[in-house]
Image (spheres, rainbow, N blue to C red):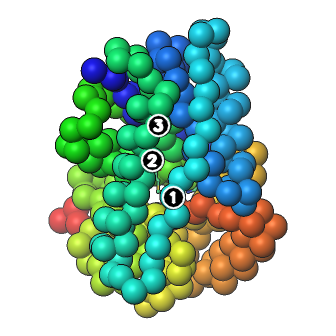
């Protein structure tokens, strides 16, 4: 049996790492570091910095691997994600067989928390289900980009006693405002907020949260929408990539007091 630690590392600030995560990394034989091409090498750098700072076990080995690219041509979104997970699971299986002896362990450093819009757990389950390599696995929770966003803006996630919707850009237009007074939007390459027909809604936007390049903008959507669009475009051109998230809010605490 080989053991896989799926370790949440927070969203860019090495100080997001929990003591539980540091202990898991030091108890592991191999740490697997993904490389996603030059544009996102800064993300690989954060993982390296975390290892340099916290991994004191001299016996730990580090293995870099290439993440297969997701193919989108001639297939639906769901099919393309399914195919992609299958390709990554083949890569993982090969890594486990090549780099881990029976009884050894490996760790994946997962951005944010492994339970939030991340495929690592699902892919590990695929590898285990295929049955070519016997696996046990555990998850160490991490600080999510949602927590990084609300902390940077110094706002609570929810209104008092109210629900929160977590969604992607593709789904925002059909559900806000509506299902909940608060929506958190992740994975939005289309800037869906600019299509929301409610200039009185509030938006709390953040990019590169937790890193030295963090940017935040907040205000009434109708007043800050253009500034966010321009700032985002400029930052994306400068860095070659962007990770941003935002919270949209309609209403206030105790609006329905009566
Ligand atoms: C694949 S999801 C991973 C989410 C991650 N597991 C988490 O717990 O936050 C990537 C999305 O998370 C958000 N995100 C992650 N890190 C971020 C950061 N440092 N700043 C802003 N948004 C971030 C963005 O919406 C990005 O498109």
| 62 with respect to 238 (left or right) | left
Label 1: which residue? 68
Which residue appears at 69% of the width and 72% of the height? Answer: 232
User: On screen, 207 above or below 154?
Assistant: below
Q: CA distance from mark 1 to mark 2?
A: 8 Å
| 249 with respect to 10 (left or right) | left
| 111 with respect to 123 (left or right) | right
Label 3: which residue? 95
Labels 1 and 2 touching (C-beta < 8 A): yes
Residue 132: quarter of image: top left
Which residue appears at 43% of the width and 90% of the height? Answer: 197
In this rendering, the count of numbered labels is 3
Crowd class of label 3 (few under 14; some 14 to 19; many from 20; radius 10 Å): some
Can residue 151 be seen here? The reply is no
User: On screen, 207 above or below 62?
Assistant: below
Residue 91: which numbered mark, if any? 2
């Amino acid at each position: 049996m080989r053991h896989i630690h799926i370790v949440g590392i927070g969203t860019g600030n090495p100080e997001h790492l929990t003591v539980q995560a540091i202990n898991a990394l030091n108890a592991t034989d191999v740490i697997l570091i993904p490389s996603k091409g030059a544009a996102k090498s800064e993300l690989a750098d954060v993982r390296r910095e975390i290892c340099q700072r916290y991994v004191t076990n001299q016996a730990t080995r580090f293995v870099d691997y290439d993440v297969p690219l997701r193919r989108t041509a001639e297939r639906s979104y769901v099919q393309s994600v399914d195919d992609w997970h299958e390709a990554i699971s083949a890569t993982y299986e090969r890594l486990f067989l090549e780099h881990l002896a029976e009884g050894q362990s490996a760790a994946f450093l997962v951005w944010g928390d492994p339970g939030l819009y991340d495929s690592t757990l699902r892919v590990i389950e695929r590898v285990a289900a295929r049955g070519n390599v016997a696996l046990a696995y555990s998850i160490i929770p991490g600080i999510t980009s949602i927590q990084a966003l609300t902390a940077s803006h110094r706002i609570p996630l929810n209104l008092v006693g109210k629900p929160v919707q977590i969604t992607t850009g593709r789904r925002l237009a059909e559900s806000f405002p509506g299902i909940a007074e608060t929506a958190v939007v992740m994975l939005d390459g289309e800037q869906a907020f600019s299509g929301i027909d409610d200039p009185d809604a509030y938006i709390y936007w953040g990019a590169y949260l937790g890193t030295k390049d963090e940017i935040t903008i907040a205000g009434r959507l109708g007043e800050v929408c253009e500034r966010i669009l321009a700032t985002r475009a400029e930052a994306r051109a400068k860095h070659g990539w962007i990770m941003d998230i935002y919270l949209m809010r309609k209403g206030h605490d105790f609006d329905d007091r009566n």
